[in-house]
Amino acid sequence: MTSIRELHQQLVNKERSAVEITTEALERINAVDEQVKSFLQVTADHALETAKKVDAKIAKNEEIGLLAGIPIGIKDNMCTTGIKTTCGSQILANFVPPYESTVTQKLKDAGAVMVGKTNLDEFAMGSSTENSGYQVTANPWDLSRVPGGSSGGSAAAVAASECVVSLGSDTGGSIRQPASLCGVVGLKPTYGLVSRYGLVAYASSLDQIGPFARNVEDAAILLGAIAGYDAKDSTSINTPIPDYTQFLKPSLEGLTVGVIDETFGEGLDPVVAKTVQDAIAHLKTLGAKVVNISCPRFRYGLPAYYIIAPSEASSNLARYDAVKYGIREDADTLIDMYTKTRAKGFGNEVKRRIMIGTYTLSAGYYDAYYLKAQKVRTLIKQDFDAGFEKVDVLVCPTSPTTAFKAGEKTSDPLSMYLSDLMTIPVNLAGLPGMSIPCGFDEQNLPIGLQLIGNVLEEGNLFQVAYAYEQSTDWHNQVPPLK
């Protein structure tokens, strides 16, 4: 798939039209999405209409931005006016938002072409996209395996060249883990850098929207377009947004990279461990100083997350009461209507997390579980703070394993939860994290290297990622998908 900058140049030079580029993306979706199942709905008419507007601007010699005419996929938990937003849940099977999320409005204003809404684990709860209420997305590298989750549809769509870039959301690793499993670039920005207005909430203190791309520069361009202060989001950070492409340098001279000791050990696939260690050794050759860093509470992130996130979900999902929106099951009493609607509309994983969260927030258990988990969260943040006093960027594997077989972990929720072991602490601390391709295992399945930055220091991540990418060839590999 051609990069954003190359496509932009072709449009400006009038070598190709936005309609041609969009049609090509739609034809690709038509050719492969029956196998991959990245998209819950393809918005062909909407896409072509946007593309025509871009072409009209070019015909008048008006200036267009880098994203104008670029095909993009949007995770189906971001509200789009007049276009269904289901969150992968049957409870929202008929929901058409009356308003636009801030990120999709920014992309509209930039002339980006939304080709469709991508599949996800229901309400973004999952690590494999098998919890979708509609379909199971496949990994383009091996259709019998999962693409990761919950943003599996967005990751698979980019890996399968069904769109140039896409947006996902990351609550505990839901951008970085599927990016790793699908062999693409995925970035979770600093909490508050990108507006959450119009993102259907799962766990409000953890959710963050971010980009998927085939290369680091495309991710930098997309982040620049969606980042920025938004008065509609009370957690939005009011800070100047730099041009992230200015950080794309080939050298790492002067940068110190810290390897998190606690991420190498039990539970990590030996091939993943070796590949990531090789990638870290390569960073040294690019000029980086590499040191070992201890984050002693890193592994407590997983249990803390699975108390905090379900607690917030329990509160956030209380709004699906069959009164205001979504499906409604008829019943004689109000309580029966709630019960029947939620029983039918929510999937098993969503019900499980609502029950866990309701339990941990209940009288008598709040102090024992929820409050304790929040204290652990603070300790994890302190470990990161101590690490960043010595280094510019932290590195570790993104996922403990490569893509696993569909159905392999569905009967074992705890095994599934362990998929996010490396990514969750980054969300708990509100830090930016990025996954970049760094190799393959013996079955030709992608492996990701995770880069973690300090608050609002996405620039360091882009510098390390770009230098690594430009001196290796992993990002040029494409899935054997016909």
Image (cartoon, rainbow, N blue to C red):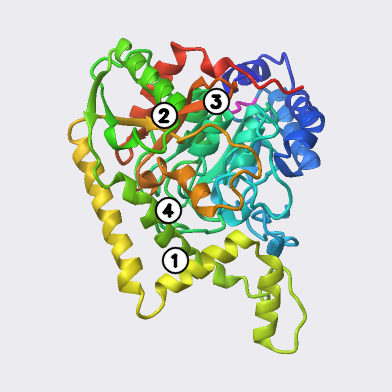
Q: Which residue is the site of mark 1?
A: 311
The amino acid marked with disc number 3 is Pro
Instruction: Say which label, 1 or 3, has the lower sequence index.
Output: 1
The answer to whether 330 appears left or right of 65 in the picture is: right
Return the x and y of residue 474 as percentages of the image width and height.
Answer: 52, 17
The amino acid marked with disc number 2 is Asp
Callout 4 crowding tier (Cα within 10 Å): few <14, some 14–19, many ≥20:
many
Residue located at (22% from left, 42% from top) = 385
Residue located at (38% from left, 13% from top) = 250
Return the x and y of residue 37 as percentages of the image width and height.
Answer: 73, 39
Residue 243 tag number: 2
Residue 346 tag number: none
The answer to whether 158 appears left or right of 468 in the picture is: right
Residue located at (36% from left, 46% from top) = 425
Spatial separation of the CA atoms under disc 1 and disc 3:
33 Å
Q: Quadrant of residue 460?
A: top left
Residue 206 tag number: 4
Instruction: Say which label, 1 or 4, has the lower sequence index.
Output: 4
Q: Which residue is the site of mark 3?
A: 446
Q: Quadrant of residue 137?
A: top right
- Quadrant placement of the N terminus: top right
Q: Which residues are magenta?
A: 62-66
Callout 1 crowding tier (Cα within 10 Å): few <14, some 14–19, many ≥20:
many
| Residue 110 in sight in this render | no
Spatial separation of the CA atoms under disc 2 and disc 3:
29 Å
Q: In the figure, 102 relative to 90: above or below?
A: above
